[in-house]
């Protein structure tokens, strides 16, 4: 019975790791990539939509990305969405195309990115703790109701802790690689 809770927890932990990885992709290191912008949600006629659904995104150079929008009326919404994300990109508009250019990274901007990386990492770790606590509570509830035995309760806790530890190690590894990438 505890295995069902563990299986669901593993799925949740994997989703948390995937979300963390996607957040890491959004942190700009030495070069820009289309992934930086594609999932940012922009207002389009009163509806929030990811930029990747409003046009095509391509990298022109390591420091420049072009967003070719399907319709010129999307430009304002996309610009506001990028600004809201806090990405430090300068933009120029040419019809339905927006060119985003990133300034060269300075020592100060690299330090700011490292701080942001650490903040995102801590948020991800908090999510892991939340998921662990929820699963442990579910296991304890099943034990209290007599649906699982005491030894299964502790076996479930050990397996849960192992799964959380594995997810945390993966996230640490991802963050370490990103930090090296940022520091260049």
Image (tube, rainbow, N blue to C red):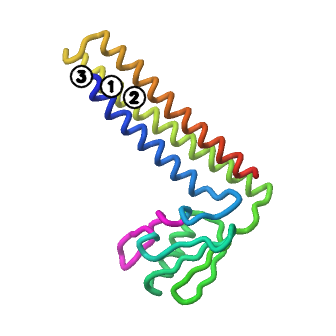
Measured along the vertical axis of the image, is residue 76 above or below residue 120? below
Q: Nearer the viewer, residue 49 or 29?
A: 29
Answer with left or right where residue 48 lies relative to residue 96: left
Residue 43 % position (x, y): 42, 73
Residue shown at 30%/20% (left/top)?
Answer: 140
Q: Is residue 77 magenta?
A: no
> Closer to us: mark 1 or mark 3?
3
Q: Which residues are magenta?
A: 37-50
| Residue sitting at the far top | 151
Q: Is residue 45 magenta?
A: yes
**Around disc 3, counting alpha carbons within 10 Å, would you say few (fewer than 14), some (14 to 19), or many (20 or more)?**
some
Q: Say which label, 3 or 2, has the lower sequence index.
A: 3
> Closer to us: mark 3 or mark 2?
3
Q: CA distance from mark 1 to mark 3?
A: 14 Å
Answer with left or right where residue 63 lies relative to residue 127: right
> Which residue is label 2 attached to?
133
Residue shown at 33%/25% (left/top)?
Answer: 137
Q: CA distance from mark 3 to mark 2?
A: 18 Å
Measured along the vertical axis of the image, is residue 97 above or below residue 64? below
Q: Nearer the viewer, residue 165 or 79?
A: 165
Q: Secondary structure at mark 1?
A: helix
In the rendered view of the protein, which quadrant contains the N terminus?
A: top left
**Around disc 1, counting alpha carbons within 10 Å, would you say few (fewer than 14), some (14 to 19), or many (20 or more)?**
few
Residue 101 % position (x, y): 67, 73
Q: Which dot marks residue 1?
A: 3
Residue shown at 30%/14% (left/top)?
Answer: 152
> Which residue is label 1 attached to?
137
Residue 184 % position (x, y): 76, 52
């Amino acid at each position: 019975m505890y295995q069902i809770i563990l299986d669901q927890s593993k799925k949740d932990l994997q989703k948390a790791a995937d979300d963390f990885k996607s957040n890491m992709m959004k942190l700009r290191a030495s070069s820009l990539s289309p992934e930086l912008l594609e999932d940012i949600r922009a207002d389009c006629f009163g509806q929030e939509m990811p930029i990747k659904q409003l046009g095509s995104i391509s990298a022109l150079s390591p420091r420049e990305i072009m967003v070719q929008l399907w319709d010129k009326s999307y430009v304002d919404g996309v610009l506001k969405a990028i600004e809201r994300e806090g990405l430090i990109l300068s933009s120029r508009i040419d019809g339905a195309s927006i060119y985003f250019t990133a300034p060269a990274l300075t020592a100060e901007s690299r330090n700011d990115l490292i701080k942001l990386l650490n903040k995102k990492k801590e948020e991800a770790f908090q999510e892991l703790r939340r998921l662990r606590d929820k699963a442990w509570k579910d296991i304890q509830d099943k034990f209290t109701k007599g649906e699982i035995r005491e030894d299964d309760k502790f076996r479930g806790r050990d397996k849960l802790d192992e799964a959380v530890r594995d997810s945390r190690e993966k996230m640490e590894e991802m963050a370490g690689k990103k930090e090296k990438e940022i520091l260049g």
